Image (cartoon, coloured by chain):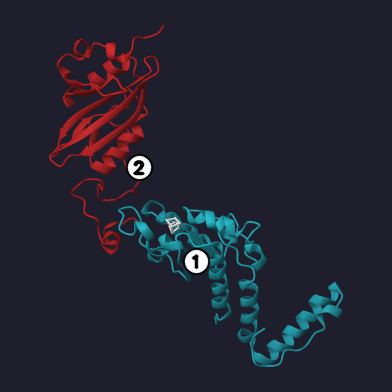
Chain colours: A red, B cyan
Amino acid sequence: MTAAPASSVQWPELLGNSLIALEPLEGTSGRLRFRAADAERVFRAVHDAGFHHLTLVGGIDWVDHREVIYTLWSDERKSYLFLSTDLPADHPSIATATKVWPSANWHEREAWEMVDIHFDGHPDLRHLLMPDGYEFHPLLRSFKLHEPEDLEVKVRHV
Amino acid sequence: MAGDAAVPFVEIEALRSREFIPAAKEALSSMIAEQGQSKLIRPVFNWAGRNSLFPLHWGLACCAIEFAAAFGARWDAERFGVVPRSSPRQCDLMIVNGTVTWKVAHKLITLYEQMPEPKWVIAMGNCATGGGPFRTAYSVVPGVDKLVPVDVYIAGCPPRPEAMLDGILRLEDLIRLRKE
Ligand code: SF4
């Protein structure tokens, strides 16, 4: 079966009012902005539309809010799709994608560690690149580069 | 052999191999009787130690490539008796060749503690010396001397193999002067 190209997926019908916007993006089937509260339903629907491969989960700190981006690839449609959603900066939490795409596991750990986004229901949300007990989320814009000596005092794990 | 007193002269080359050890033993014990133990034994140990430094084979970052080159055919650090070993139990020298992150810091300390005494540390490259280009980064230890005592620092990013050999020779000078 040759599936139709991704642009032919009827996202509004598939996702209903979980869909906020579908922005065309060259070379992909677009960037799909969805409501964070409906994350699990959106993940499942997108997965069942043929996007079985999760390439990347990334977090962005926009100061007034955070954004999570999922990059997906469909082997059948030979096409990328970007999912993105906005989270409030004071309580940035979203359902985990690991139940749909197990490969989200380490990506979500990294996004949590670097820009402090909580993934509810994640099986193992602990540090990935930094040592256990590291107290900062270093890719937040509010993180100041410390003098090395400060950092040494604050990292108490050795 | 260091020391001011005259050393009993043994015609080493004239000895047959099975006669060597008894002759050396006799020469040593007569010297110990004359000069006391530590003054004599220490230089012997230092001489042996500095001519057979066994560094830990532990590449951390880009400097490890220069470390490898120094042991290749072109620079051949083994002619100084420096042979990298794969287990810390067999090593007396740790060459920290690369960027030490906080994540790997306690492994570095574990490896250092596993090495038998006496042991030395060379910080190779700017990263190990003071954090290098990543000094203010959130993940990098600003100098490995925050974790273990360092004897010789080698500057460079990365240091050339010649610089590494120079660092090893300087460490040998340090060992020559060791008192206890
Ligand atoms: S000093 Fe330079 S070459 Fe050596 S590990 Fe650091 S960045 Fe790499």
Q: Which residue is mark 1?
A: B122
Quadrant into which the C terminus of chain B falls: bottom right
Q: Residue at x 26, y 58 (%)?
A: A154
**Ligand 1 shown in quarter:** bottom left
The residue most toward the front is: A26
Residue depth check, mark 2 versus mark 1: number of the one nearer the observer: 1
Mark 2: give few (<14), some (14-19) or many (20+) Cα within 10 Å: some
Q: Is residue B116 visible?
A: no
| Quadrant position of residue A91 | top left
Q: Which chain does tag 1 point to?
A: B
Question: Is B175 on the left-hand or right-hand side of A29?
Answer: right
Q: Which residue is mark 2?
A: A128
| Quadrant position of residue B140 | bottom left
Say if B135 sits above or below A22 in the image: below
Q: Secondary structure at mark 2?
A: loop
Question: Is B18 on the left-hand or right-hand side of B136?
Answer: right
Indicate the position of residue A87 as horizontal and vertical percent values: 16, 33
Q: Which chain does tag 2 point to?
A: A
